[in-house]
Protein backbone atom coordinates (compact mmCIF):
# COMPACT_ATOMS: atom_id res chain seq x y z
CA UNK A 1 0.00 0.00 0.00
CA UNK A 2 1.30 3.51 -0.83
CA UNK A 3 2.11 5.57 2.30
CA UNK A 4 -1.14 6.70 3.86
CA UNK A 5 -2.04 9.49 6.26
CA UNK A 6 -5.26 8.47 8.00
CA UNK A 7 -7.06 10.69 10.48
CA UNK A 8 -9.48 9.07 12.94
CA UNK A 9 -12.06 11.58 14.12
CA UNK A 10 -14.76 10.95 16.68
CA UNK A 11 -15.85 11.71 20.21
CA UNK A 12 -14.05 10.43 23.29
CA UNK A 13 -14.77 6.72 23.51
CA UNK A 14 -15.65 6.39 19.80
CA UNK A 15 -13.11 3.58 19.51
CA UNK A 16 -10.33 5.59 17.84
CA UNK A 17 -7.59 3.86 19.86
CA UNK A 18 -9.16 0.41 19.43
CA UNK A 19 -9.49 0.77 15.67
CA UNK A 20 -6.07 2.44 15.29
CA UNK A 21 -4.48 -0.66 16.87
CA UNK A 22 -6.39 -2.87 14.41
CA UNK A 23 -5.14 -0.73 11.50
CA UNK A 24 -1.55 -1.00 12.78
CA UNK A 25 -1.91 -4.81 12.79
CA UNK A 26 -3.43 -4.86 9.30
CA UNK A 27 -1.23 -2.35 7.48
CA UNK A 28 1.95 -2.15 9.60
CA UNK A 29 1.79 1.64 9.74
CA UNK A 30 2.58 3.92 12.69
CA UNK A 31 0.01 4.94 15.31
CA UNK A 32 0.22 8.49 16.59
CA UNK A 33 -2.09 9.25 19.51
CA UNK A 34 -1.62 12.67 21.07
CA UNK A 35 -3.55 11.48 24.13
CA UNK A 36 -1.15 8.55 24.60
CA UNK A 37 1.85 10.87 24.08
CA UNK A 38 0.53 13.30 26.70
CA UNK A 39 -0.18 10.49 29.19
CA UNK A 40 3.34 9.11 28.62
CA UNK A 41 4.80 12.58 29.31
CA UNK A 42 2.83 12.70 32.56
CA UNK A 43 3.91 9.23 33.61
CA UNK A 44 7.55 10.15 32.93
CA UNK A 45 7.12 13.34 35.01
CA UNK A 46 8.47 15.61 32.25
CA UNK A 47 7.96 19.38 32.26
CA UNK A 48 5.41 18.96 29.47
CA UNK A 49 3.59 16.31 31.50
CA UNK A 50 3.35 18.60 34.53
CA UNK A 51 2.14 21.46 32.36
CA UNK A 52 -0.79 19.50 30.87
CA UNK A 53 -1.90 17.40 33.87
CA UNK A 54 -4.58 19.74 35.22
CA UNK A 55 -6.06 20.46 31.78
CA UNK A 56 -6.28 16.78 30.89
CA UNK A 57 -7.85 15.86 34.22
CA UNK A 58 -10.47 18.58 33.74
CA UNK A 59 -11.43 17.14 30.34
CA UNK A 60 -10.38 20.29 28.49
CA UNK A 61 -8.05 20.60 25.49
CA UNK A 62 -4.31 21.11 25.77
CA UNK A 63 -2.95 24.09 23.78
CA UNK A 64 -2.63 23.78 20.01
CA UNK A 65 1.01 24.84 20.19
CA UNK A 66 1.99 22.01 22.55
CA UNK A 67 0.12 19.37 20.61
CA UNK A 68 1.49 20.53 17.25
CA UNK A 69 4.99 20.38 18.74
CA UNK A 70 4.43 16.75 19.77
CA UNK A 71 3.19 15.78 16.29
CA UNK A 72 5.96 17.68 14.49
CA UNK A 73 8.59 15.79 16.52
CA UNK A 74 6.85 12.42 16.19
CA UNK A 75 6.69 12.72 12.40
CA UNK A 76 10.48 12.92 12.29
CA UNK A 77 10.63 9.25 13.35
CA UNK A 78 11.46 6.84 10.51
CA UNK A 79 8.56 4.47 11.29
CA UNK A 80 6.14 7.08 9.89
CA UNK A 81 7.62 6.76 6.37
CA UNK A 82 5.39 3.76 5.59
CA UNK A 83 2.29 5.74 6.54
CA UNK A 84 0.56 6.62 9.80
CA UNK A 85 -2.70 7.00 11.66
CA UNK A 86 -3.51 10.13 13.61
CA UNK A 87 -5.73 9.30 16.62
CA UNK A 88 -7.17 12.20 18.62
CA UNK A 89 -5.41 14.78 16.46
CA UNK A 90 -6.27 17.22 14.99
CA UNK A 91 -8.92 18.36 17.44
CA UNK A 92 -9.24 22.04 16.51
CA UNK A 93 -9.26 23.97 13.23
CA UNK A 94 -5.89 25.52 14.22
CA UNK A 95 -4.44 22.01 14.66
CA UNK A 96 -5.83 20.95 11.27
CA UNK A 97 -4.20 23.99 9.64
CA UNK A 98 -0.96 23.26 11.51
CA UNK A 99 -1.06 19.66 10.33
CA UNK A 100 -1.52 20.79 6.72
CA UNK A 101 1.60 22.96 7.06
CA UNK A 102 3.65 20.12 8.61
CA UNK A 103 2.56 17.69 5.89
CA UNK A 104 3.40 20.21 3.14
CA UNK A 105 6.95 20.40 4.51
CA UNK A 106 7.15 16.59 4.45
CA UNK A 107 5.63 16.44 0.97
CA UNK A 108 2.80 14.28 2.32
CA UNK A 109 -0.98 14.61 2.17
CA UNK A 110 -3.91 13.38 4.21
CA UNK A 111 -5.28 10.37 2.31
CA UNK A 112 -8.43 9.56 4.35
CA UNK A 113 -10.40 10.93 7.26
CA UNK A 114 -12.68 8.47 9.05
CA UNK A 115 -15.22 10.01 11.39
CA UNK A 116 -16.35 7.32 13.85
CA UNK A 117 -19.79 8.36 15.03
CA UNK A 118 -21.09 7.26 18.43
CA UNK A 119 -23.91 8.82 20.46
CA UNK A 120 -23.08 10.50 23.77
CA UNK A 121 -25.05 7.99 25.87
CA UNK A 122 -23.05 5.08 24.40
CA UNK A 123 -19.76 6.92 24.92
CA UNK A 124 -20.59 7.47 28.59
CA UNK A 125 -21.16 3.73 29.13
CA UNK A 126 -17.95 2.82 27.34
CA UNK A 127 -15.73 5.28 29.16
CA UNK A 128 -17.04 4.98 32.69
CA UNK A 129 -16.58 1.17 32.44
CA UNK A 130 -13.13 1.31 30.81
CA UNK A 131 -10.23 -0.06 32.87
CA UNK A 132 -6.68 -1.22 32.18
CA UNK A 133 -4.25 -3.61 33.84
CA UNK A 134 -2.30 -1.79 36.56
CA UNK A 135 0.87 -3.58 35.44
CA UNK A 136 0.96 -3.97 31.63
CA UNK A 137 -1.80 -1.54 30.59
CA UNK A 138 -3.89 -4.18 28.74
CA UNK A 139 -7.35 -2.66 28.05
CA UNK A 140 -10.58 -3.96 29.61
CA UNK A 141 -14.18 -2.94 30.01
CA UNK A 142 -16.02 -3.99 33.16
CA UNK A 143 -19.07 -5.08 31.15
CA UNK A 144 -18.03 -5.54 27.48
CA UNK A 145 -14.56 -7.12 27.85
CA UNK A 146 -13.69 -8.06 31.47
CA UNK A 147 -10.65 -10.28 32.23
CA UNK A 148 -11.45 -13.99 31.63
CA UNK A 149 -10.58 -14.79 35.27
CA UNK A 150 -11.80 -12.15 37.70
CA UNK A 151 -8.87 -10.17 39.12
CA UNK A 152 -6.21 -11.69 36.80
CA UNK A 153 -4.89 -9.91 33.70
CA UNK A 154 -5.37 -12.07 30.55
CA UNK A 155 -2.22 -10.66 29.01
CA UNK A 156 0.42 -10.60 31.77
CA UNK A 157 -1.21 -12.68 34.55
CA UNK A 158 -0.85 -9.84 37.05
CA UNK A 159 -3.29 -9.68 39.95
CA UNK A 160 -2.72 -5.94 40.31
CA UNK A 161 -5.98 -4.00 40.53
CA UNK A 162 -7.44 -2.67 37.29
CA UNK A 163 -7.00 1.09 36.99
CA UNK A 164 -9.31 3.79 35.67
CA UNK A 165 -8.12 6.76 33.60
CA UNK A 166 -8.44 9.95 35.68
CA UNK A 167 -10.58 11.54 32.95
CA UNK A 168 -12.98 8.58 32.69
CA UNK A 169 -15.02 9.56 35.79
CA UNK A 170 -18.58 10.49 34.76
CA UNK A 171 -18.23 14.27 35.27
CA UNK A 172 -14.95 14.38 33.35
CA UNK A 173 -16.49 12.45 30.48
CA UNK A 174 -19.23 15.11 30.30
CA UNK A 175 -16.57 17.85 30.10
CA UNK A 176 -14.74 15.97 27.31
CA UNK A 177 -18.01 15.64 25.40
CA UNK A 178 -18.59 19.39 25.71
CA UNK A 179 -15.11 20.07 24.27
CA UNK A 180 -15.84 17.62 21.48
CA UNK A 181 -19.21 19.12 20.51
CA UNK A 182 -18.10 22.75 20.86
CA UNK A 183 -14.71 22.52 19.17
CA UNK A 184 -13.68 19.22 17.59
CA UNK A 185 -16.94 18.54 15.76
CA UNK A 186 -16.25 21.63 13.63
CA UNK A 187 -13.49 19.65 11.90
CA UNK A 188 -16.08 17.73 9.87
CA UNK A 189 -16.86 21.07 8.17
CA UNK A 190 -13.16 21.81 7.67
CA UNK A 191 -12.57 18.47 5.93
CA UNK A 192 -15.87 18.26 4.02
CA UNK A 193 -14.52 20.14 0.99
CA UNK A 194 -11.64 17.81 0.12
CA UNK A 195 -13.83 14.74 -0.46
CA UNK A 196 -11.67 12.63 1.88
CA UNK A 197 -14.09 12.49 4.79
CA UNK A 198 -16.03 9.28 5.43
CA UNK A 199 -18.46 9.06 8.35
CA UNK A 200 -19.11 5.59 9.73
CA UNK A 201 -21.36 4.16 12.42
CA UNK A 202 -19.14 3.35 15.42
CA UNK A 203 -21.81 1.38 17.30
CA UNK A 204 -21.88 -2.41 17.31
CA UNK A 205 -19.42 -5.25 17.52
CA UNK A 206 -15.76 -4.07 17.39
CA UNK A 207 -15.02 -6.34 14.39
CA UNK A 208 -17.98 -4.95 12.48
CA UNK A 209 -16.83 -1.40 13.20
CA UNK A 210 -13.33 -2.35 12.00
CA UNK A 211 -14.78 -3.71 8.74
CA UNK A 212 -16.50 -0.33 8.23
CA UNK A 213 -13.24 1.51 8.91
CA UNK A 214 -11.36 -0.64 6.38
CA UNK A 215 -14.12 -0.15 3.79
CA UNK A 216 -13.93 3.62 4.32
CA UNK A 217 -10.15 3.50 3.75
CA UNK A 218 -10.01 1.08 0.84
CA UNK A 219 -13.23 2.23 -0.82
P1 LIG B 1 -7.43 11.05 24.14
O1 LIG B 1 -6.51 10.10 24.78
O2 LIG B 1 -7.28 11.34 22.69
O3 LIG B 1 -8.88 10.63 24.52
P2 LIG B 1 -10.28 10.78 23.80
O4 LIG B 1 -10.33 11.39 22.44
O5 LIG B 1 -11.13 11.44 24.80
O6 LIG B 1 -10.68 9.35 23.46
P3 LIG B 1 -10.44 8.04 24.24
O7 LIG B 1 -9.02 7.63 24.14
O8 LIG B 1 -11.06 8.11 25.60
O9 LIG B 1 -11.39 7.08 23.39
P4 LIG B 1 -11.12 6.35 22.01
O10 LIG B 1 -11.93 6.99 20.93
O11 LIG B 1 -9.67 6.15 21.77
O12 LIG B 1 -11.84 4.98 22.33
P5 LIG B 1 -11.23 3.57 22.80
O13 LIG B 1 -10.80 2.80 21.61
O14 LIG B 1 -10.29 3.73 23.92
O15 LIG B 1 -7.30 12.47 24.89
C1 LIG B 1 -7.28 12.58 26.28
C2 LIG B 1 -7.04 14.04 26.68
O16 LIG B 1 -5.75 14.46 26.21
C3 LIG B 1 -8.02 15.06 26.09
O17 LIG B 1 -9.19 15.18 26.87
C4 LIG B 1 -7.14 16.34 26.10
O18 LIG B 1 -7.07 16.89 27.39
C5 LIG B 1 -5.78 15.80 25.73
N1 LIG B 1 -5.54 15.78 24.27
C6 LIG B 1 -5.27 14.69 23.51
N2 LIG B 1 -5.10 15.03 22.23
C7 LIG B 1 -5.28 16.39 22.17
C8 LIG B 1 -5.28 17.32 21.10
N3 LIG B 1 -5.05 16.95 19.83
N4 LIG B 1 -5.50 18.64 21.39
C9 LIG B 1 -5.71 19.03 22.66
N5 LIG B 1 -5.76 18.20 23.72
C10 LIG B 1 -5.55 16.86 23.47
O19 LIG B 1 -12.59 2.89 23.33
C11 LIG B 1 -13.20 3.36 24.52
C12 LIG B 1 -13.80 2.18 25.31
O20 LIG B 1 -14.84 1.60 24.54
C13 LIG B 1 -12.80 1.04 25.57
O21 LIG B 1 -13.12 0.48 26.82
C14 LIG B 1 -13.07 0.06 24.44
O22 LIG B 1 -12.75 -1.27 24.81
C15 LIG B 1 -14.56 0.23 24.23
N6 LIG B 1 -14.98 0.04 22.84
C16 LIG B 1 -14.34 0.45 21.70
N7 LIG B 1 -15.06 0.10 20.61
C17 LIG B 1 -16.17 -0.53 21.07
C18 LIG B 1 -17.30 -1.14 20.44
N8 LIG B 1 -17.45 -1.16 19.11
N9 LIG B 1 -18.24 -1.69 21.24
C19 LIG B 1 -18.12 -1.68 22.59
N10 LIG B 1 -17.07 -1.13 23.26
C20 LIG B 1 -16.12 -0.57 22.50
MG1 LIG C 1 -7.89 6.84 22.70
Image (cartoon, rainbow, N blue to C red):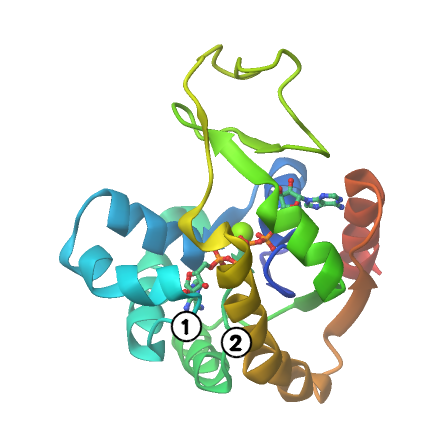
Measured from the top left, where is residue 45 in percent x and y? 17, 47
Q: Are marks 1 and 2 in contact (CB under 8 Å)?
A: yes
Q: Secondary structure at mark 1?
A: loop
Location of mark 2 (residue): 179
Residue shown at 56% from the left, 66% from the top: 174
Q: Which residue is mark 1?
A: 61
Q: From this viewpoint, which residue is outermost toward the front?
A: 171
Percent of width and height locating residue 10: 65, 65
Q: CA distance from mark 1 to mark 2?
A: 7 Å
Q: Is mark 2 within 8 Å of ligand 1?
A: yes
The reply, left or right, for residue 191 in relation to residue 81 is right
Q: Nearer the viewer, residue 74 or 125?
A: 125
**Residue 14 as seen in the image, left or right of residue 69:** right
- Residue 205: mark in rendering: none
Work out whether mark 1 precedes mark 2 in sequence or the reverse, and give the earlier one: 1
Q: Quadrant of the C terminus?
A: bottom right
Is ligand 1 less than 8 Å from the beta carbon at label 1? yes
Q: Residue at x 72, y 75 (%)?
A: 196
Amino acid sequence: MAPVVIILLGPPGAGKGTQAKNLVDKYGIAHISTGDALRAARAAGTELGKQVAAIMDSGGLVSDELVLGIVRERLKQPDTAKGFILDGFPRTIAQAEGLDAILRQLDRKVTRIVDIQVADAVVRGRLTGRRSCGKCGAPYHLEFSPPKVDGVCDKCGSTAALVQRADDMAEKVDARLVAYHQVTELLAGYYKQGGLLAAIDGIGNMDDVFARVVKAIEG
